[in-house]
Amino acid sequence: MYDFSYHRAGSVADASSKLKAAEDGKLVAGGMTLIPTLKQRLAQPSDLIDLGGINDLAGIKADGSGVTIGAMTTHGAVATSKDVKSAIPALAHLAGEIGDPQVRHRGTIGGSIANNDPAADYPAACIGLGATIVTSKREIAADEFFKGLFETALADDEIVTAVRFPKPKRAAYMKFPNPASRYALVGVFVAETGNGMRVAVTGAGQNGVFRVKAMEDALGKSFAADAVANISVPDGDLNSDIHASAEYRAHLITVMAKRAVAAAE
Amino acid sequence: MTYTVSMSVNGKAVKGEVEGRTLLVQFIRENLRLTGTHVGCDTSQCGACVVHVNGTSVKSCTLLAVQAEGADITTIEGLAKGDELHPMQAAFRENHGLQCGYCTPGMVMSAIDLVKENPNPTEREVREWLEGNLCRCTGYHNIVKSIEAGAKAMRGG
């Protein structure tokens, strides 16, 4: 790991100004992706600004319309939250399938979505539920937030502070995990929301998470596993790597979508 | 850049000079000379480095020492009371829950955290919990048996 200057932020405003002042600053939330990245010398920030001391960024609030999850809330806290389990069980289930218990004790929702790894789970929940990303500057609809491989709509000094998930009528997430990393080889989040059907796919797309309109339309007519059984996503824009070919991922999308619909029925 | 960090390790206040990039596991092993916490893979996968930070199991190879400023840390050395092993350690010995022993400190620390969250785990729950602890010798069978026995002992019999 290259060395860097370390700063512990006392508040979101403090983190934002430290980030602005740094030559090439990086925020660290749980560090479950960033620290391994630094170890491999794939990044060389001049400054690391730690959000770990900002207590009001962690926590879960629920009301009748959904749940709001603070950016520094860990995956473990989401997975075991009574509020999340009762309002959006699919979201608690998704959080409980990220990494392993020790990773879930440190990794955070804000860190995950700000990083926008194409195989991360949370982007699928954000898109699948039509979440709103709350930042230090504004609110961004999930559909406008994820901009491609490790790219988001966040400005350089903008910090995710919370994610608001509206409560769906029904939803489920099914993933085929890479057996070593537990990242999604393919993960499909299916939801019937107040604004219609949403089907979000992670792990497969060359540009990260995406929606499958044909499946959404089919589920709008009939919410049943059979409705998506014959819909496949063209493999042209899907990832091919040592773990799976694009063709295999395309096949898995349909299989995982069917399972998610069946689980949500 | 160097920083002074202070934290509590196994109930003792400790202080040390570290670089920003110093990992918690390096601080524990090299500054404090507590070498029971192991580095296996150094890529957050194997769990040989698991310690408790503020009562929760984490991988100390994926945490900076500066991030643990002010925290309460427990390592494998902090479990036994004098010559009396922690019930989970005793269960690993009793059930032969190890072969080479390299992964054992992490297994024990992880297992104790499981029992804290789930005092009476099923075999399946134990196996699922061990997702982040790799053992290349045992095939896990005796580790799972040890944890079931350790959980029972921690419940008081």
Image (cartoon, coloured by chain):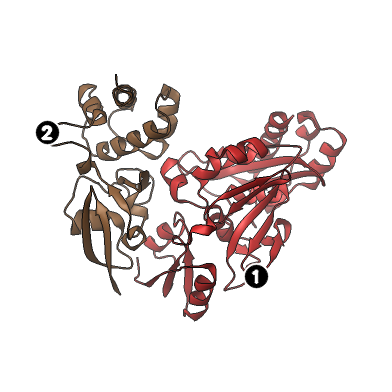
Chain colours: A red, B brown
Residue A212's disc number: none
Residue furthest to the left = B83
Residue B83's disc number: 2
- x then y, percent, for residue A196: 82, 44
The reply to whether residue A203 is in sight is no
Answer with left or right where residue A175 lies relative to residue B139: right
- x then y, percent, for residue A105: 44, 46
Residue A137's disc number: 1
- x then y, percent, for residue A30: 46, 56
Answer with left or right where residue A164 lies relative to residue A27: right
Using the image, name the chain to which the residue with label 2 belongs.
Answer: B
Q: Dividing the picture into quarters, in which one does residue B21 lie?
A: bottom left
In the picture shown, does residue A100 fall above or below B156?
Answer: below
Please tell me whether mark 2 sits on a helix, a strand or a loop: loop
In the picture shown, does residue A200 fall above or below A44?
Answer: above
Classify mark 2: residues with Cα within 10 Å, few (<14), some (14-19) or many (20+). few
State which quarter of the image contains the C terminus of chain A.
Answer: top right
Labels 1 and 2 within one chain = no
Please tell me whether mark 1 sits on a helix, a strand or a loop: loop
State which quarter of the image contains the N terminus of chain A.
Answer: bottom left
Q: Mark 2: which amino acid? A: Asp
Q: Mark 1: which amino acid? A: Lys
Using the image, name the chain to which the residue with label 1 belongs.
Answer: A
- x then y, percent, for residue A100: 45, 41
Q: CA distance from mark 1 to mark 2?
A: 57 Å
Q: Residue at x 24, y 58 (%)?
A: B27
Answer with left or right where residue B97 lies relative to residue A2: left
Q: Residue at x 57, y 43 (%)?
A: A185
